[in-house]
Image: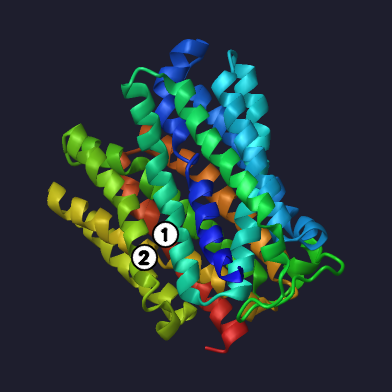
Amino acid sequence: MVSLLLPLIYVAFISLGLPDSLLGSAWPLMVGEFSVPLSYAGIVSMIISGGTIVSSLLSDRMTRKLGTGLVTAVSVLLTAAALFGFSVSNAFWMLCLFAVPYGLGAGAVDAALNNYVALNYASRHMSWLHCFWGVGASVGPYIMGWAVGANYGWRSGYGIISGIQIILTLILFLSLPIWRKKSVENSVSEDTGAPVGIGSALKIKGVKAILIAFFGYCAFEATAGLWASSYLVEYHGVDTETAASFASLFFLGITAGRFLSGFVADRIGDTNMIRIGIAVITCGVVLMALPIHTAFTALVGLIIIGLGAAPVYPSVIHSTPNRFGKENSQAVVGIQMASAYCGSTFMPPVFGLIAQYINIAIYPYYMALFVLLLFVMTERVNRICNGK
């Protein structure tokens, strides 16, 4: 019975990834129906991000009180309800309303499951966990595309994903006894004592540095993914179809890289996996920044960046209990998630302004800034926590 828990966690992370790309996929159709400017997608996205930040910061308190299993089940239920709400919305304000539970559910399950796997499973499982998120993020737009292509409309796309989430919610509630069992191999009991406050967590040596590192990584990753296609088209003259394909290869590179990383993560260790990832990212960024006005190096560089990014996020999360203490890990993971969402929410739009008013050619240098920040801060954490 307990052996079912890990596959269930993997499925839950597929569920977490499923809705992540839906808004971008459906918005070109939604915008006309709601009669709002194209830019209003940013409003919905910001509300979702705000919810994820709030629930991430509250994850320690919720998990200690309710347990990881119940937090996960309730969070997926919130997400399912929000997606159903999107499918029946007939006004823009309704989208904004349902974006609130959407974000709250996503942030809570993300923080709770990441910490649970970091505490209870080997590093390889963290890599594969985030690989499964990539599977969900890839399948979501496919389902939406099928619904639209079959003339069922974007509402049906949201409805189908909501239905999948509802089924998973039922499974999660039925599986709560599995989560409560204490005989999981290599597991630790969940700490139900007093929650670690945000202020207390920030006083732990190395936490502030890892938050800055996480901010830098997610700012880099989100910027790379959002602006890759525009950079290839505007600066290198790549046709839009090819640019879109290679932009998607960046995400496929992350997903494939996390799958492969799982086979070596336990032997290499979290610290070295982060270092290797940063080194590979740097090679890709250098290729993109070469003063050669050819698309080939930029295209290859983008794929290399995706592969290099793969092990960084999972390894940072998995190393949290060892670096900052198991009793503090849920609080630290929660504020790491909040810092990550801040980086991915606010820094890509900043580059949009740079591209508009200065030059989109700055794209690789903008990414390099955050990669450098990531390297400096992770090495600082290594010296503080690992002594190396």
Q: Visible in this render: residue 52?
A: no
Where does residue 169 sit, x and y in percent of width and height? 63, 45
Where does residue 40 sit, x and y in percent of width and height? 52, 23
Please name the residue shown 24% across and 35% down the image: 234
Please tell me whether mark 1 sits on a helix, a strand or a loop.
helix
Please tell me whether mark 2 sits on a helix, a strand or a loop.
helix
Query: What type is the residue that disc 2 sits on?
Result: Phe
Please name the residue shown 61% across and 68% down the image: 1
Above or below, comparing residue 385 to residue 282 in the picture:
below
Residue at the disc numbered 2:
259
Residue at the disc numbered 1:
131
Please name the residue shown 44% across and 73% down the image: 274
Q: CA distance from mark 2 to mark 1?
A: 6 Å
- Label located before the other in sequence (2 or 1): 1
Q: Residues within 10 Å of mark 1 (few under 14, many from 20)?
A: many
Circles 2 and 1 in contact, beta carbons < 8 Å: yes
Above or below, comparing residue 167 to residue 36 in the picture:
below
The label number, if any, that marks residue 105 in the structure image: none
